[in-house]
Image (cartoon, rainbow, N blue to C red):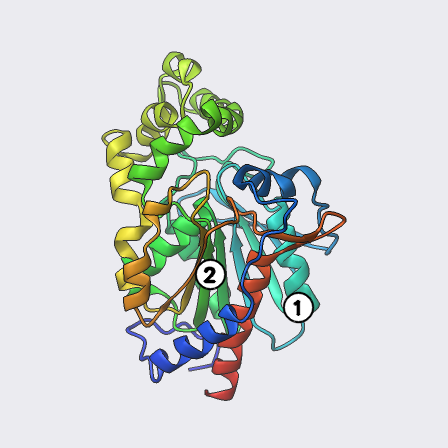
Amino acid sequence: MSSNSIQIGPKAAPRQAERKARAMDALNAHPFIPPAWLRNPHAQTMWAPLFRRRGTVRRRIERLETPDGDFVVLHISEGDRGMPAALLLHGLEGSASSKYIHGMHEKLHAIGWHCIAMEFRGCSDEINRTRRLYHSGETTDLAFVAARFAAQFPRLYLAGFSLGGNVLAKWLGESPCDVPANVHAAAVVSVPFDLVVSGPHIDSVLRGFYARHFLRSLVKKAIDKEKQFPDCVNVALLRKARTLYDFDNHATAALHGFRDVDHYYSSQRSGQFLDQVRVPTMLLSAADDPFNPATTLPREVADRSEYLHPQFTERGGHVGFVYGAPHQARYWAEEQVMRFFQNYEEFATKGV
């Protein structure tokens, strides 16, 4: 069997406790210190979307046909021969154009790694073909794409942000024996580990400011889907939706086979699968995240597990973690992802 073949089965973890300790020492040597000019969690959350420039790494676009007759779009930057690959997952209503995805592409490209950003169905320029969109716990596309690139590259690393982090953490824990053996590490940033809490919470923050922002595009997508598949959703109820809870009840649940929004939230929260994760995984979140209350952070399970590496900070907002000077802002979460991946790449290549 070639070194690039996918091997399915339980993964042995020699010295994993020691590896976790060494990785945690490397991560903790670089704590997040929010700057005096950007300590508010909403300012942290909105800084990059408003002021950060997009990266300039050249990427090719590949449209990958899925087994159910649909497609996902991949944005790929080529690395050096023999180097590992990283697969990136964006957040709610994000895309490969999201600035944190561009930021990761630039950092990975700079060290010669291959990088693939997967856009969830309905998040590329063209509406997808089947009677579904994407949601916080839909893992079949991730499993399909990861299997393809695990077969192509000697080592594969994965990073998910917000909703994409929930998808990734859920996939790693729900069927750990199905994760390709050459997936060496993963990182999830600003994850809604408990959708039962985080789902309704976002609707109340800043009097629904964030929810209204997402609803503008979400409702349009669901109505467009109804034009493809008449009566798949109740358009009249969707037009009246003023909260993400209502949208998930009338669109997400209806399109993806959940009884209702509560069934969706309770069954798709990644936190319930974390104790089954058998891939070294960094959990990076802030206690002041406007989307996810501090009570949802899985501190105990992360401390118990040899595979989970907690990076829980007091400040940082949602996919924020901005520091430095305003004209030279840096993004700590992306830097920590890189440190984490490079630590586990060293473990893999040197047999540490």
Residue 44 seen by the camera: yes
Disc 1: which residue: 79
Type of amino acid under label 1: Gly
Confirm or deny contact between disc 2 and disc 1 (CB under 8 A): no
Residue 53 relative to residue 83: left or right: right
Residue depicted at x 52% and y 84%: 349
Type of amino acid under label 2: Ala
Residue 89 relative to residue 196: left or right: right
Q: Nearer the viewer, residue 311 or 97?
A: 311
Residue 90 locus on image (x, y percent): 52, 47
Quarter of the picture holding the N terminus: bottom left
Position above or below: 321 against 280: above
Residue 177 seen by the camera: no
Q: Nearer the viewer, residue 88 or 265?
A: 265
Circle 1 SS class? loop
Residue 202 locus on image (x, y percent): 41, 32
Residue 187 locus on image (x, y percent): 46, 61
Residue 70 locus on image (x, y percent): 46, 42
Position above or below: 60 against 307: above
Mark closest to the chain's N terminus, 2 or 1: 1
Position above or below: 21 against 290: below
Q: Nearer the viewer, mark 2 or mark 1?
A: 2
Q: CA distance from mark 2 to mark 1?
A: 20 Å
Q: Residues within 10 Å of mark 1 (few under 14, many from 20)?
A: some
Disc 2: which residue: 187
**Mark linked to residue 260:** none
Position above or below: 281 against 68: below
